[in-house]
Amino acid sequence: MSGLIDILVLGGGGREHALCWKLRQSPRCGRLVCAPGNAGIAEVADCVDLAIADPAAVVAFARENGIGLVVVGPEGPLVAGVVDALRAAGIAAFGPTAAAARLEASKGFTKDLARARGIPTAGYRRFASAADAHHYVAVHPLPVVVKADGLAAGKGVTVADSNEEGLAALADIDGPVVVEECLTGPEASLFVLADGNSIAVLPSAQDYKRVFDEDTGPNTGGMGVVSPAPLLTDALRDRALAEIVMPTLAAMAEAGTPFTGVLYAGLMLTADGPKLIEFNVRFGDPEAQALLLRLQGDLVELLLACAEGRLAEVTPTWSDETAVTIVYAAMGYPVTPITGTLIDNLDEAAALGVQVFHAGTRRNASGKLVAAGGRVLAISALGADRGEARSLAYAAIRKIRWHGGFYRRDIAKI
């Protein structure tokens, strides 16, 4: 394959900045457009205003602008059927169809699939509403996990240590609920690319979900990550592939909804082996920042091959180094982040050799960089080992001047 290709990336977070940063490095990348983008993405791509969860609007924009590949970052457009519409229009799209995206859109769907296929996961019950789950949560052995069935941007999960906490979690859910037993063990993330026929296994990662040090406080979209995951050995990875990922892909294909795109399996490494926590159907955030820092090959060719069903022709290559990403979040996150605060000195941080990915940022009327979301920056570093990458990332984050932000100080420590 050869020739320039114009690319549209949907999304405006740290994941999408990492995607745009890596796509721009490809000799095949022509015009690069991102909707809506952010202040960091604007340095490598044209940012446009587009209703990214509106399939007709995305198709119309792609046609009018000669887009040859659409890369869908967040889950919302996938569930809305954007990939379906693009494919029907003959436009290559990276990501699953709406039917395949149910693996993330409905935790209940995924739990039922796992039960039917004998995939190891936590015991569970599904309920049509929070009210229906009230008595079950009130008497369930502790701890108990309460999950909103639908999309929740990585924050719709409560691990309740008391029945009262579980009931409080129910009060915040509007819609179907899944209640699970609580698995114990370290967590790890396993990623595969799939084109409906072939797969390519990506490096593992370990995400740090809790907002504060020592894994305390509420769950967030992710406060940091290390890749590879320290405890996901090759043997455990192969077991997770054989017992969790491959049976899932087979089930989706047999149902007439083959999975294409990136499948992200959240795993609990229990005493009985890896068990499925949940699936996501897109790159994780901040996992994408760490993974793409380690990718040595051409991302355009890799994603295009995946979209066109010829993934077997491409072999991605990865750095043997360790990547560490630290999220710099706005005060008040994940409840009510304080926005509009000034951020400065990113150049000094980057000069240490790290990548500073933007998530919730914008330029104010004076052109100054300000916080515009909950997770605002993701400082990502490579090192010969976890300690070196971690030290570099923390040295860089300390160079940034931002009085309105905070970060965990124990990312990749354990």
Image: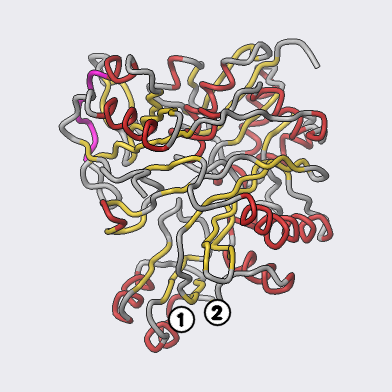
Quarter holding residue 162? bottom left
Give, as a three-letter code, the residue at label 2: Arg
Mark 2 Cα within 10 Å, few/some/many (few <14, many 20+)?
A: some
Foreground residue among 290 and 368: 290
How far is the residue under mark 1 from the one under mark 2? Answer: 9 Å
- Secondary element type, mark 1: helix
* Residue in view at x 67 percent, y 19 percent: 64
Foreground residue among 194 and 384: 384
Foreground residue among 53 and 154: 154
Q: Is residue 268 above or below residue 382?
A: below
Q: Is residue 58 magenta?
A: no
Side (left or right) of 323 relative to 237:
left
Indicate which label's residue lies in the foreground, 1 or 2: 2
Residue 96, position as x, y percentages in the image: 69, 45
In the rendered structure, are the residues bearing label 1 and label 2 in contact, judged by CB atoms less than 8 Å apart?
Answer: yes
Q: Which residues are magenta?
A: 338-345
Residue beneath label 2, please? 125
Side (left or right) of 76 relative to 193:
left
- Secondary element type, mark 2: strand
Q: Residue 133 bears which disc, if any?
A: 1
